Image (tube, coloured by chain):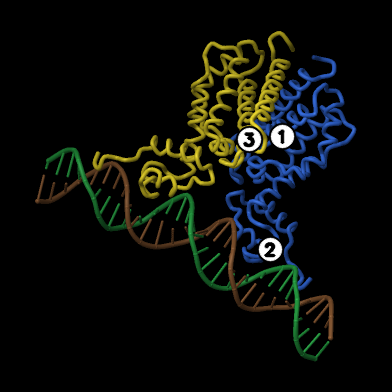
Chain colours: A blue, B yellow, C brown, D green
Amino acid sequence: MSPAARLDTESILRAVFDLLDQEGVAALSMRTLATRLDVKAASLYYHVPNKAALLQLVSDRVASQVLAALTPESGWRELMTGMAHSLREALGVHPGAAAVVAVRNVSPEVFEPAVPLVLASMHAGLRLTDEEALFLVQSLFILVTGHALAEFGEVPEPPAAPRAYYDTWFDIALSTFLAGVHARHGADAG
Amino acid sequence: MSPAARLDTESILRAVFDLLDQEGVAALSMRTLATRLDVKAASLYYHVPNKAALLQLVSDRVASQVLAALTPESGWRELMTGMAHSLREALGVHPGAAAVVAVRNVSPEVFEPAVPLVLASMHAGLRLTDEEALFLVQSLFILVTGHALAEFGEVPEPPAAPRAYYDTWFDIALSTFLAGVHARHGADAG
DNA sequence: ATTCCTTTCTAACATCGTTAGGTTGAGACT
DNA sequence: AGTCTCAACCTAACGATGTTAGAAAGGAAT
């Protein structure tokens, strides 16, 4: 080591979230980001390969938070409602991140470690293949992300409709999807 | 009129779709677009206020195509499967447009005219309020769009998985959602 | 011919992501 | 102590972007 590093990937990522939350995705440039960190833009490239990789980090961070919040040994319904709610909450805390997460697929390194837990829960009370289980979970992810995107289009402009509107929409979308999962794969149904 | 207009909003929009299809959203700049039309970039601004408005036109065009394909006097299931399939087909024909459509809400001017038809179909065989019906339709829209986005992330790079993978995923997501709608609101259920 | 009005142009602005190459300064080694 | 090394930052510049102001072009109307 040498001149006590002012920067690292983690601190940069934190600044990205701050900037995203306060100014929105449109205000996120390598220069505005660097300014927040009392540094020049080029310095960021020592810690991060490029902007795309930085945004992928944002997406993966949100996803890994959601996956880390999963409770093992739970049933499929608990898993899916938990996932949906914690994802929605994460995107509610970081509204500017919704537009970033929505257009990016989660990295396999982030998703794959959670697969066994997901499959175990999905098979607890459901009759389906592994492939079907993962498809359903990914679809739920898409549904929640897309919903958040509709709510926080271009932060920080406030949503067009009141919060309650999106809350009920979310509840309806979620419970409808879960009802479909139960109807098609529920252990007590066909 | 004067020097026989080479440009109009419609021809520009066509060129946007062509460019989107062939080179992807990353290659769509006002300059590349103008070059395709044998014109300089600034000329576009006589016909379109800015790039954001142009992308909104793309989104609205896709949406209005989908809504125009709806068959009146149909049941809710026919409506929703028809919507889902024609939206997926439209985004399959214009893969680069998926990223554009996904991050934009459909303009009210495009959506509202279709509301009566949508509500009539949704009420044919379903017990729910108007608000619930619209929520479900919008959720389906989000689901299909998000799915297409996962498939065609950054066109024209080919998808990571084979076509069949996304086909079965799509079928599972759609039929699960529809099963949920039926389970929760089917006229013969509770 | 001259005027008028629509459409396109040239030229420029600020900002963007990114790279090449120079500077700094703390710890390691003699 | 002096010197070397190398991580971590800087300056400066590149080309590309969206956008605007204002000039030019060229039919249509007088």
Task: Please report, as a chain letter, where disc 1 is located.
Answer: A
Which quarter of the rendering shows the C terminus of chain A? top right
Q: Residue at x 66, y 37 (%)?
A: A148
Task: In the rendered structure, find residue B163 and report the number of the disc placed on it.
Answer: none
Viewer-proximal residue, A143 or B40? B40
Q: Are marks 3 and 2 on the same chain?
A: no
Task: Please report, as a chain letter, where disc 3 is located.
Answer: B
Location of residue B160 in the rendering, given as x and y in whole percent from the top left corner: 66, 38
Mark 3 highlights which residue? B151
Q: Are marks 3 and 1 on the same chain?
A: no
Mark 1 highlights which residue? A141
Q: Is residue A93 left or right of residue B155?
A: right
10 Å neighbourhood of mark 2: few (<14), some, or many (≥20)?
few
**Quarter of the view holding residue A2:** bottom right
Task: Please report, as a chain letter, where disc 2 is located.
Answer: A
Location of residue A84 in the rendering, given as x and y in whole percent from the top left corner: 75, 34
Q: Callout 3, which amino acid?
A: Glu
Q: Is residue C21 left or right of residue A12?
A: left
Q: Callout 1, which amino acid?
A: Phe
Disc on the earlier residue, 2 or 1: 2
The reply to whether discs 3 and 2 touch (Cβ–Cβ < 8 Å) is no
Position of residue B63 relative to residue C3, above or below, is above
Q: Are marks 2 and 1 on the same chain?
A: yes
Viewer-proximal residue, D4 or A161? D4
Q: Residue at x 56, y 30 (%)?
A: B92
Mark 2 highlights which residue? A46
Location of residue B188 in the rendering, given as x and y in whole percent from the top left corner: 71, 8
Q: Is residue A50 left or right of residue B69?
A: right
Q: Secondary structure at mark 3?
A: helix
Location of residue A186 in the rendering, given as x and y in whole percent from the top left corner: 81, 19
Q: Callout 2, which amino acid?
A: Tyr
